[in-house]
């Protein structure tokens, strides 16, 4: 009996890299959902289930096009001091966000969902809490110059696997959740469906 294909409904290079490094075979099909429309339904700027809802909508959108496959949807939301943050659209916005996060604790909400035949078959949201140190303006200038527009590829304007780690004084939570893909529970669920070796 052949296994159903596995599709990642995300254009995230980090998520694809994590799955490949784990030895998971999959294809990539970007979902075309309107994330802004979904976010407007969440009036509370720090609502936790939003990341899971976005992950579910991505998985469902691709599942409708590929009903025989199992679809992985994933998303991440950052909240800090009662405000919700998306990926910055400009370098100026990235600077403003980092200054807002400086010396503060923020939360990353990472949602992940599996869909098949147009229905959600599993979902999970995990949180990680990170506290930025009180870095200087000089360091911030250096950091933004070094990374350039790469800071706009993540919701928090950092990648822990690179120079972004220097922004922090403490981190609480699962590393893969911080990267936007709670990998261990996902692998356990894929194992249950026979998509990775038991």
Image (cartoon, rainbow, N blue to C red):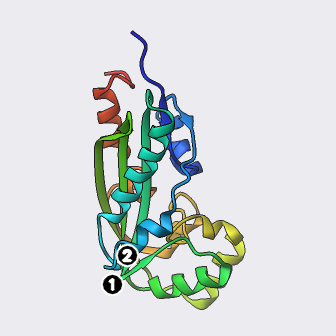
Regarding mark 2 in the picture, which secondary structure is present there? strand
Q: Mark 1 highlights which residue?
A: 82
The answer to whether residue 192 is above or below residue 97 is above
User: In the rendered view, does 26 fall on the left or right side of 55?
Assistant: right
Measured as percent of width and height from the top left, residue 106 is found at: 37, 76
**Label 1: element kind:** loop
- Within 10 Å of disc 1 (Cα), the crowding (few <14, some 14-19, many 20+) is few
Nearest the camera: 110 or 101?
110
Left or right: where 33 falls relative to 185: right
Screen quadrant of the C terminus: top left
Identify the image quadrant of residue 169.
Answer: bottom left
| Residue at figure coordinates x 63%, y 75% from the top left | 89
Q: Which mark is residue 62?
A: none
Please say if 21 is above or below 159: above
Residues packed near mark 2 inside 10 Å, few (<14), some (14 to 19) or many (20 plus): many
Tags 1 and 2 in contact by the CB under 8 Å rule? yes
Is residue 147 visible in the rendered image? The answer is yes
Report the residue at 60% width, 83% height from top.
93
| Tag 2 residue | 79
Please give the count of numbered marks on the rendered protein.
2
- The residue drawn where x is 41% and y is 86% is 103
Q: Residue 151: x, y in percent?
A: 62, 70
Picture residue at 31% right of the left edge, 26% below the top:
193
Q: Distance between the residues labelled 1 and 2?
A: 7 Å
Q: Where is residue 108 in the image (x, y as percent from the top left)?
A: 38, 66
Question: Where does the image place residue 1, in percent across and percent down from the top left?
Answer: 39, 9
Q: Which residue lies furthest to the top in this view?
A: 1
**Residue farthest to the bottom?**
137
- Is residue 172 visible in this depiction of the protein? no
**Residue 141: quarter of image:** bottom right
């Amino acid at each position: 009996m052949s296994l159903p294909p596995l599709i990642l409904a995300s254009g995230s290079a980090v998520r694809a890299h994590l799955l490949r490094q784990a030895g998971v075979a999959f294809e990539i099909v970007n979902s075309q959902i309107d994330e802004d429309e979904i976010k407007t339904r969440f009036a509370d700027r720090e609502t936790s289930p939003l990341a899971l809802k976005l992950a579910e909508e991505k998985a469902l959108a691709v599942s409708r096009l590929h009903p025989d496959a199992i679809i992985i949807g994933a998303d991440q939301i950052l909240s800090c001091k009662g405000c919700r943050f998306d990926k910055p659209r400009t370098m100026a916005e990235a600077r403003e966000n980092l200054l807002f996060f400086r010396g503060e604790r923020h939360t990353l909400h990472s949602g992940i969902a599996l869909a098949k035949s147009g229905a959600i078959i599993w979902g999970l949201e995990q949180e990680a809490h990170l506290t930025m140190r009180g870095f200087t303006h000089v360091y911030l200038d250096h950091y933004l110059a070094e990374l350039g527009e790469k800071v706009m590829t993540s919701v928090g304007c950092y990648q822990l696997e690179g120079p972004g780690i220097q922004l922090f004084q403490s981190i609480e939570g699962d590393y893969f959740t911080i990267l936007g893909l709670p990998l261990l529970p996902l692998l356990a669920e894929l194992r249950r469906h026979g998509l990775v070796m038991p």
